Image (cartoon, helix red, strand yellow):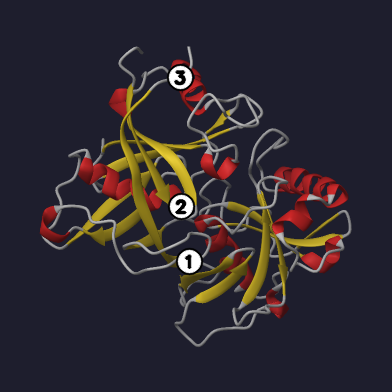
Amino acid sequence: MTDGVRCMLMRGGTSKGAYFLADDLPADPAARDDLLLRIMGTPDPRQIDGVGGAHLLTSKVAIVSAAEDPGHDIDYLFLQLGVDEPTVSDRQTCGNLLAGVGQFAVERGLVPAGPDRTTVRVRLLNTGTIAVATFATPGGEVDYRGDTAISGVPGTAAPVELDFTETEGSVCAGLLPTGNVRDDIGGIEVSCVDNGMPVVVARAADLGVSGHESVDELAADTALAERIDALRIEAGKLMGLGDVKSTSVPKTTLVAAPRAGGAICTRTFIPVRPHTSIGVLGGVSVVTALLLDGAVGGDLLVAPAAGAPVEIEHASGKLAIGIEFDPDAATPRVRRSTVLRTARKLFDGAVFPRP
């Protein structure tokens, strides 16, 4: 490793991660994971001897390769690396890092760029679902500059349109993994939904908070963290995920009435640490849940006009998500979900792992 490993560091949405071609990493998963831990600087709460950013949102990896099967352009594997603990998980995908995967594929020559815009069909290997990313490529080159702002990221960048289909039951057995729209876990009513990310939705008030607290306030509430952990561990069993004590799924989102002109206010935990915003596919699952008849928190939702996206308020701003249901389905079926993100290349070169 004296020559380093070819790597591109990118901000994707409200996350940051290291992007690699699969061919530049060991084929053996154990050897690959060991290398990535040393690249990120895990385990260490500061990740001082690696390129990780000392937070789960910045200790992420995207591994990209040319598509092995027809019907899509590239394959994308997401890995969540621990910070304090030497863990590497592929049990979920990441819609934020996805925002940079298409551009990375173009820059690495896996996909040809269009003369003005490029659309890339991406298979999310963690879930087996397909996402379509569309972004600017004026003159056949990726351009990260633009005037689109997203909450949680300073400045502006070029927009990236993400379109998801067939995301129901991405990790669990279906859209409603427990078979119910509403469940009771230890006296707390919840809705468990998987439309791209397994999520447990509960009213903030039912856990003794308003749902409008800052991230720091939530992080300081150790009693809340214990209740969140207990809730998601039991929900994981009901959702068919087994023992989730050492994993980051399911995510837990607390909902409250909106205060800033959005449709709903949210506070999300990964798994018990408060999220500074909300994940893309986590947000998709939360909005899906709130739109189902009888779901927990549905009465708090300020429904948008027909066909308009649902604007989620989160700890650092808002996120607009479009959900299209199949009106002819006997049971709830999601046709597609749409989100607008941005991404930016931060550096491209070689990264040198810790010995």
Residue 192 image position (x, y, % from top left)? 67, 57
Residue 104 image position (x, y, % from top left)? 28, 43
Nearer the observer, disc 1 or disc 2?
2
* Nearest to the observer: residue 269 or residue 176: 269
Tell me which label, 3 or 2, sits earlier in the chain: 3
What residue is drawn where x is 46% and y is 52%? Answer: 95
Badge 1: residue crowd in 10 Å (few <14, some 14–19, many ≥20)? many
Q: Report which residue position mark 3 lands on.
A: 35
Tell me which label, 1 or 3, sits earlier in the chain: 3
Q: Is residue 100 left or right of residue 52?
A: left
Q: Amino acid at mark 2?
A: Asn
Q: Is residue 103 left or right of residue 282?
A: left
The secondary structure type at the circle numbered 3 is helix
Residue 51 image position (x, y, % from top left)? 48, 31
* Nearest to the observer: residue 67 or residue 319: 319
Q: Report which residue position mark 1 lands on.
A: 334
Q: Name above or below for residue 50 compared with residue 8.
A: above
What residue is drawn where x is 51% and y is 49%? Answer: 170
The residue sitting at the bottom extreme is: 305
Q: Where the N terminus falls, by quadrant? A: top left
* Nearest to the observer: residue 315 or residue 74: 315
Q: Amino acid at mark 1?
A: Val
What residue is drawn where x is 53% and y is 60%? Answer: 152
Q: Report which residue position mark 2 lands on.
A: 96
Q: Are marks 1 and 2 in contact (CB under 8 Å)?
A: no
Question: How far is the residue under mark 3 from the one under mark 2?
Answer: 23 Å
